[in-house]
Amino acid sequence: MSTTLVLGTEKGAFLCRSKDRAKWTVEGPLFKGWKVTASTRTPGGRYLFATSSYVYGAALQTSTNLKDWKQVEKGPSYPKAKSDRQPTPGVAVGPGFEPRMNQIWTLAAAGKRLYAGADTAGLFTSDDDGESWQPVASLNDHPSRPNWFPGAGGLCLHSILVHGNRIWIGISAVGVWRSDDGGRSWTPKNKGVRHVIEDEKWKDIGFCVHGLASDPKEPDTIYRQDHAGFYISRNGGDTWDAAENGLPAGSVGMPGAKISASFGFPVAVDPHTKSLFIVPLESDEYRMPVDGKLRVYRSRDGGKSWEGLGEGLPNTPTYAGVLRGAMAVDAQKPCGVYFGTTSGQAFASADSGDTWRPLPCTLPRILHVAAYADR
Amino acid sequence: MARVTIDLPSMLGNVLGGVRRIEAEGDTWTQALDDAFRKLPALRVHVCDETGALRRHVLCFVNDVNTRFGEGPPPRLRDGDRITIMQAVSGG
């Protein structure tokens, strides 16, 4: 089986192809100059890539062969607005804020439905293989929305998990929400997680989820890399427990004090063994590998303990981080693990993280990594 | 109505199937852009924001004149005028 990696960067997408996951070729850039922030394969077998530019806005591109592309004309969009005001970092957007489509942060396929998460935060769905998209008003117009405030990466909906009618989404810096009715209604699910900023009115928002992944066999087991630590829920998000035994000591700033917690962004799960993969960073202040050691951490026991993996990763001081969308696993046995850094290096492991090798390229800042099995 | 050309920057061509020039008609540059949006619907989202105005960092020139400058109604186009969409110099 051959594998194609999509590396979405600040300046275009690159495709890395391999038949054995050892030797890789690199193609690109696709969409030269554009941020490529997400991708998925649709139920109909097409690829969707999310492109954005601070000058020219955001759109979806579609292709059946990763060569010939067409922009989706009825992509995710917000209604006509009266002002061009953007959210201010760290400040709730306030009443009357009009959202805009700055970037599509994530794409997900579940059954015949496609989901897109956006900045400014919103959820969109498509039931026609990505040709047209509709906003999910029950979430996007939630009464708490005026009290949502952006994290450092903006006010963005960046994570989507779906199992049947149960949907989880993550918004920075609002928290995790769950729908049990296919998206008709939503409830914040953050009990047990430390607030990053407590809202005066809505006590169950103000959490800064960074990344989500679900257990491949137990969908109500959810893994959460948060601003304030790494957490696991075994009841669909009703409650969360920290799971940081063996992770390097990091710290995050909390009102009144600094606390010890594992800061980071991506989380991925081996679909066969359920091993977890994360990349801890020093703190929310510094956002760099601890002591300049770029390491992936793996848990093979559901988060009870963690081990650092570095064989084949740089041994020289490395202070490039890994962004939330920039790590992926494939579905092979043993599972492949892939990640890209903020300095444009990319690494691949064909043995579930035991050993790593660099991909033969140095790219712009890597925003998105996805692995597709070629058919 | 005047027949004009609208030139697009290479970055827009990179997401619009390589299109770099559109022939359009209109009495004003806004009408000509609307005609271009009819011919190439995927263009609109990149040129205009949710308010319907030009995006903050997008400039539109009619021949050598920046449409952000000047007051009053937009000047009437003439056959052969060139409209150029480009990225504003926004820092660096």
Image (spheres, coloured by chain):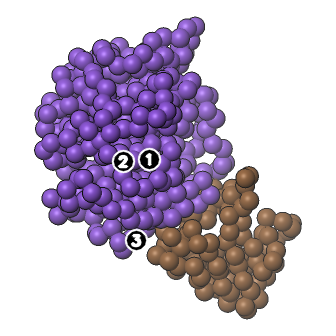
Chain colours: A purple, B brown
Q: Where is residue A184 in the image (x, y as percent from the top left)?
A: 31, 38
Q: Do the residues labelled 2 and 1 touch (CB within 8 Å)?
A: yes
Gap between marks 2 and 1 measured at Cα:
7 Å
Q: In which quarter of the image is the N terminus of chain B?
A: bottom right
- Residue B75 left/right relative to A176: right
Tell me the mark number nearer the camera, choosing from 2 and 1. 2
- Mark 2 falls on what kind of element? strand
User: Height in image: B3 above or below A235?
Assistant: below
User: Height in image: A368 above or below B88?
Assistant: above
**Residue shown at the point (62%, 28%) measured from the top left:** A91
**Residue shown at the point (39%, 71%) measured from the top left:** A69
Give amino acid for label 3. Lys
Dot 2 or dot 1: first in sequence order is: 1
Closer-to-camera residue (B10/A294)? A294
- Mark 1 falls on what kind of element? loop
Q: Badge 3, how many Cα within 10 Å: few under 14, some, many 20+?
A: some
Q: Name the residue under label 1.
A: A345
Q: Mark 2 points at which residue?
A: A358
User: Height in image: B91 above or below A152?
Assistant: below
- Residue A103 left/right relative to A70: right
